[in-house]
Amino acid sequence: MSEKEYIVPIGEGVYEINTGDWRTHRPVLDQDKCIKCGICLTYCPVFSIYKEGEEYRIDLSYCKGCGVCMHECPKDAIRMIEEGR
Amino acid sequence: MSMVDVLNGNQAAAKGAALSRPDVVAAYPITPQTPLVEYLTQFVANGELEAFMSEVESEHSAMSVVTGASLAGSRTFTATSSQGLALMYEPYFRASTLRLPVVMAIVNREMISPQTVWGGPQDSMTLRDAGWIQIYVEDNQEILDMIIQAYKIGEDSRVLLPVNICYDGFYLSHLTERVEIPDQNSVDKFLPDYTPTHIKLDPKIPMAVDPLTTGDLLMEYREKHMVAQQNALKVIQEVNEDFNKVFGRNHHGLLEKYRCDDADVILISLGSMTGAAREAVDYHREKGLAVGLLKIRSLRPFPQEEVSEVLAGRQAIGVVDRNVSFGWNTGILYQEIRSALYEKEKPVPILPFIGGLGGEDLRIEAFISCIDRLKEARGTQQKNYPRTCWLNKKGG
């Protein structure tokens, strides 16, 4: 989207505040179970999942640990692990 | 070819919505809006309206569904009243701040307590600062025509805002009038498909909606939103003129003047009460008083310049509110009119009237008595009118 059209808080890279330190649980993606469907990326509210080559990865800088990705993953490839463990 | 039919206000709204070809309709029934939802559901069931009809479990869900659908690029329609609008407050604000051109009919109903179901714009006027465009209409023809115009106004690239078409419960929603229904081809030509350029969710290009945002950036959005509201002043007039050219009906855009040209005193109205107010003006005109009527159509954006221009040089002004502004001891429109006059007008008495709450009938006699008071107020000072005059209160 061009600069001119940017009138609403929506976008591919709208990162203003580091919400990663709110997290109590972090998502961990098991690449062996992952079927590369991309559902986690679509559902992530803060757009913290990205694709690198064929694999999906999770950027923890902005991940609040909400667990939506774990809930939506059809193959149970994402687990939430308590921070500090 | 257009056709003429006898329609109640809810039927007129449903027809106006159907002619605008929404992709998604989501609504939850509430008196007095309920028949509107039933008509739309019927249109979809009959195949007259090709839209996805979402029968939701609450008004909060209704607004959330149309928000999502609009984010995905759909044209959307919803409707509510009173307590339903109150329940919708959270996603109501979001739809405007996400700049989504949703169109919602508000079938104005008084707010509780005490329990009431009858007409009055307290519900939507209380929410005037939530970023939506709010247009108040007087009759059933205006309802149908303005819902079509609402899409053209809201979807304009200079505006991109949601629009409320507000009409009084029962007085309009349940009473029938002669209404001309334009033909689909003419509406299609007048109202092209909605093609969003500022926002469109697509699963192939995932995006974040509403990330946590700092105040400095938030203010940037707010400023643009406020500019869009000001742009809408011009767009509402343009769309009214275009509509008049195509369909031959002029609804006068931001405000409508009645016998104002040489008027010494002016009474101000909003919504369905205007018909009776016109009669009262005619009555006083016959008796020799130079009185005019100003009907405010657009509450947001508020046409400050246009209002102050019409009211300049008058000797007394009266505002009839079918609502209250708690804490001001007047109605809401009264405060708007006074603010609009601050810059230009030499101080003249501006009298606050409140009446017709809870659907009480504002009869011609009530407006005649308002104008009587304006007549006496000429050449006096504002300080003589410290209190609101109640028009048809029990025991008043």
Image (cartoon, coloured by chain):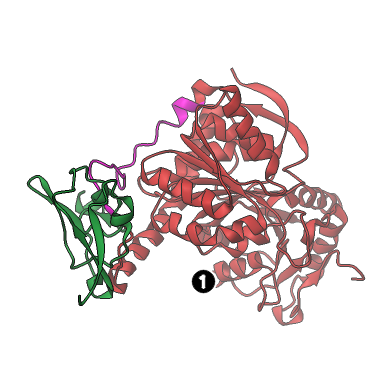
Chain colours: A green, B red
Magenta part of the chain: B187-208
Quarter of the rendering containing residue B122: bottom right
Residue A55 in view, yes or no: yes
Identified at 47% across, 60% down, the residue is B93
- The percent coordinates of residue B239 (x first, y second) are 48, 40
Quarter of the rendering containing residue B94: bottom left
Main SS, magenta region, reads: loop
- The percent coordinates of residue A21 (x first, y second) are 24, 75
B204 drawn magenta:
yes
Total numbered labels placed on residues in the image: 1
**Which quarter of the image is occupied by the N terminus of chain B?**
top right
Please name the amino acid that badge 1 sits on: Glu
Q: Which residue is mark 1?
A: B343
Residue B142 in view, yes or no: no
Q: Can you name the residue that lies furthest to the top here?
A: B1
- The percent coordinates of residue A53 (x first, y second) are 7, 46
Crowdedness near tag 1: few (<14), some (14–19) or many (≥20) residues, C-alpha within 10 Å: few
B98 drawn magenta:
no
